[in-house]
Image (cartoon, rainbow, N blue to C red):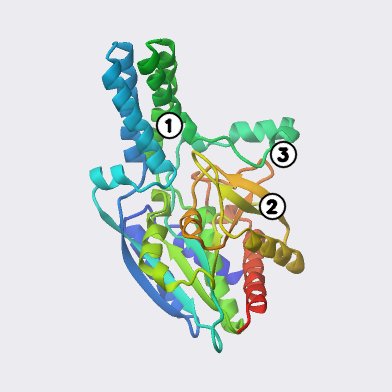
Amino acid sequence: MEVLHEVVERLAPMRRRACTDGEREAADWLAERFRRVPGVEVSVEDEPSWGTFPPTATGLGVLGLTAGALALGRRRGAAALLAAATIAGVVDEAQNGPRVLRRLIRRRRTTQNVLARVPAEGASAGTLVVLAHHDAPQTGLIFDQTMQQKVYARKPELIEAHKTPPPQWWLGLAGPVLTLATALTGRRTPARVGLAIGSVATFFIADMWRSETVQGANDNLSGVASLVALAEQLAAEPVPGLEVLLVSCGAEETLQDGIRAFMASHGQELDRERTWFVNLDTVGSAKLVLLEAEGPVWMEEYAGPWIRDLVEDSAERVGVPFERGYRARASTDSIIPSRAGYPIATIVSLQPWRSPANYHLASDTPEKLDYDTVAGAVRLVAEVARSLAARTPA
């Protein structure tokens, strides 16, 4: 508990928007904190990023609105081209595509990944990579949980029946898709509806662009503090035959620039048959849950279903409250190693109304964290490490 409080309370006041001096300050402090743990090898790696996503998404929203206006003005060819370009751009951003548009129109910047390596005692039979991210998100009206909490208070069964939230990014796609329908059919009603929906979507993303960066105690200093606590625990109680790589990525809130860079830099070193990932992302709410898949536009199941079974078994052994079967409509760092074929378990946490506590809100401050849940995540990952070492011959 002392370590968890120390890390969260020290980093939370830093203005950690991706690719800023505050993010670098956090990375440097975290590296120094890891160096205080005996036997841990630490490095800070500068990596490329193109900044937060709201500017690009806002531009795409304006492009979609322009397409709708052209469709209503009977310029169907131009409307179709702009609508198709908007759809492609939104999918490229939201679904972690090749990021063609981002690289074309945004200035290249720098983020920092912090790597803390706990060498294996004796011959290593494999590597466990534990991920978190130290940059902080921006807030915005779209993240307000008031309505969801009111629905839960009156009709909890309506919330509890669903383990997959509504797809927010579909709101950004609806406008250009309806505009494209008008361009193809000549019927003006779809474009009118698309302009209305597109205006709302563009307002929300522009509001996020102008909004402040929050302290991000839950998202995701809870995960970062867990990495430091794990380093301390592994130094005190080593897991023979298992190398553990604790990676705090930058630029997660840009939609995964940091983990993309980590995999580009280190993927060749990580044997797919002997490397396993656990991602700790926002683990300071009431209850830990395991994600099975994620997909802002369409769902992608994570690689290595067996590791999720192993995590469930580990949670039962150490007595950590835990629930399975959830799928995320937000993107996480997990999808990048998963696409590369690495087994991965994504551990998050939720409030009873099926949202992370204070998610992307100004109220995401250290005193609002459920530190018992964070400590449970640390115990769980330590048991996962022991289980992986036991199942893999040294």
Whether residue 175 is situated above or below residue 42 in the rendered picture = above
In this rendered view, identify the residue nearer to me: 360 or 69.
69
Residue ID at (67%, 72%): 383
Residue ID at (29%, 26%): 81
Q: Mark 1 and mark 3 in contact? Answer it, CB < 8 Å.
A: no
In this rendered view, identify the residue nearer to me: 116 or 1.
116
- Amino acid type, label 2: Arg
C-alpha span from label 1 to label 3: 26 Å
Quick one: SS at disc 1? helix
Quick one: SS at disc 3? helix
Reading the image, the residue beneath label 2 is: 324
- Amino acid type, label 3: Glu
C-alpha span from label 2 to label 3: 13 Å
**Dot label at residue 204:** 1
Question: In the rendering, at what x and y percent does residue 335 appear?
Answer: 49, 53
Query: Residue 165: in sight, yes or no?
Result: yes
Reading the image, the residue beneath label 3 is: 160
Q: Give neighbour class at mark 2: few <14, some 14-19, many 20+ (Cα, 10 Å).
A: some
Mark 2 vs 3, N-terminal side? 3
Residue ID at (67%, 61%): 372
- Amino acid type, label 1: Phe
Q: Give neighbour class at mark 1: few <14, some 14-19, many 20+ (Cα, 10 Å).
A: some
Query: Residue 210: in sight, yes or no?
Result: no
